[in-house]
Image (cartoon, rainbow, N blue to C red):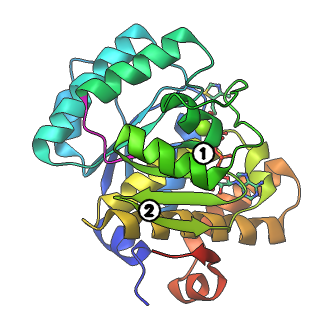
Amino acid sequence: MSHLIEEVRKNQPLIHNITNQVVMNFTANGLYAIGASPVMANAKEEVGEMAALANALVLNIGTLTDMQVDAMIVAGKAANQAGTPVVFDPVGVGATTFRTQSAQRILEQVKVTCIRGNAGEIASLAGLSATVRGVDGAGDVDMETLAAQAHQKLGVSLVITGAQDILIHRGEKVILSNGHPLLTKVTGAGCLLSSVLAAFLAVTDDVLQAMTDAVSYYGIAAENAANEQQLPGSFQVSFIDQLYNLKSEEINRKIRMIRGA
Ligand SMILES: Nc1ncnc2c1ncn2[C@@H]1O[C@H](COP(=O)(O)OP(=O)(O)OP(=O)(O)O)[C@@H](O)[C@H]1O
Ligand SMILES: Cc1ncsc1CCO
Ligand SMILES: [Mg+2]
């Protein structure tokens, strides 16, 4: 079975990230590890040009400011015009009014290809009841119901992450259960996944395949890292190494797809 990681490595897609200040370095290193080419650019004076040049765009509101939201809209519109995929990561949406209003503003003005968030964020974005604590996910949400309702409400493809990941695109659902709890002890594990997803979207028009291949690749790399290292700091380093090293044949063996499309 062919895997899109080979296309990422071959094409080295340029991924333009407008992301939060916590995860910039980790995101750039993770993108290099999978074979993509990262660039971070935030100024509204240049983001339109950069997004038009890039093969995918990531908008992440983790440490947003008014100026950065304006820049995201400029970049998003340029990407839309160029037909470039856009991933939106609504970090902590619902935790503050500013985050919620900014996320809504972005979604009103930019056509996003996929939203990647934890269950609490996706529920909040869709106006469904769930509590969001800080930038971490909510607890007891029926993920499948949430996915279906949020997908209908937002009208966008979704990757909802947690112990299990639910991917939904035009009504088709995939459930994956690779990954490791140590990912929740490293900052930016979700943010980097959003950027990795952008790199996979950059090399195909098949959105569901890109989501499936990106999320499974990421989860299996984390499992391999946890086999090597059991403490968070060393795990983070090993995870970057495993993102670099993972082979297609190993993915076919280790993928845990609970339900496919
Ligand atoms: N309990 C868990 N067991 C296995 N994998 C997990 C678990 N929780 C999260 N993951 C994995 O961690 C990655 C990030 O997902 P998560 O839902 O933690 O994102 P997030 O809340 O947006 O993270 P952050 O805000 O820290 O960037 C995904 O690949 C997901 O599958
Ligand atoms: C910890 C943190 N705070 C704002 S963004 C961020 C990175 C993880 O989402
Ligand atoms: Mg997150």
Mark 1 or 2, which is nearer the eye? Answer: 2
The quarter of the rendered structure image containing the C terminus is bottom left
Q: Is residue 232 left or right of residue 14?
A: right
For this orientation, the residue located farthest to the left is: 81
Q: Is mark 1 within 8 Å of ligand 1?
A: yes
The span shown in magenta is 110-114
- Residue 253 appears anywhere in the view: yes
Secondary structure under tag 2 reads helix
Type of residue at label 2?
A: Met
Q: Is residue 39 left or right of residue 61?
A: left
Quick check: 78 above or below 200? above
Q: Residue 259's x, y, as percent?
A: 57, 75
Q: Badge 1, how many Cα within 10 Å: few under 14, some, many 20+? A: many
Q: Residue at x 32, y 73 (%)?
A: 10
Quick check: 56 above or below 244? above
Q: Residue 192's x, y, as percent?
A: 54, 47
Residue 205 sits in quarter? bottom left
Q: Residue 239's x, y, as percent?
A: 68, 60
The span from disc 1 to disc 2 (Cα, nearest Å) is 14 Å
Type of residue at label 1?
A: Gly
Q: Nearer the viewer, residue 142 or 225?
A: 142
Q: Residue at x 61, y 79 (%)?
A: 255
Q: Which residue is disc 1 drawn over?
A: 190
Q: Which residue is disc 2 drawn over?
A: 211
Mark 1 or mark 2: which comes first in sequence? 1
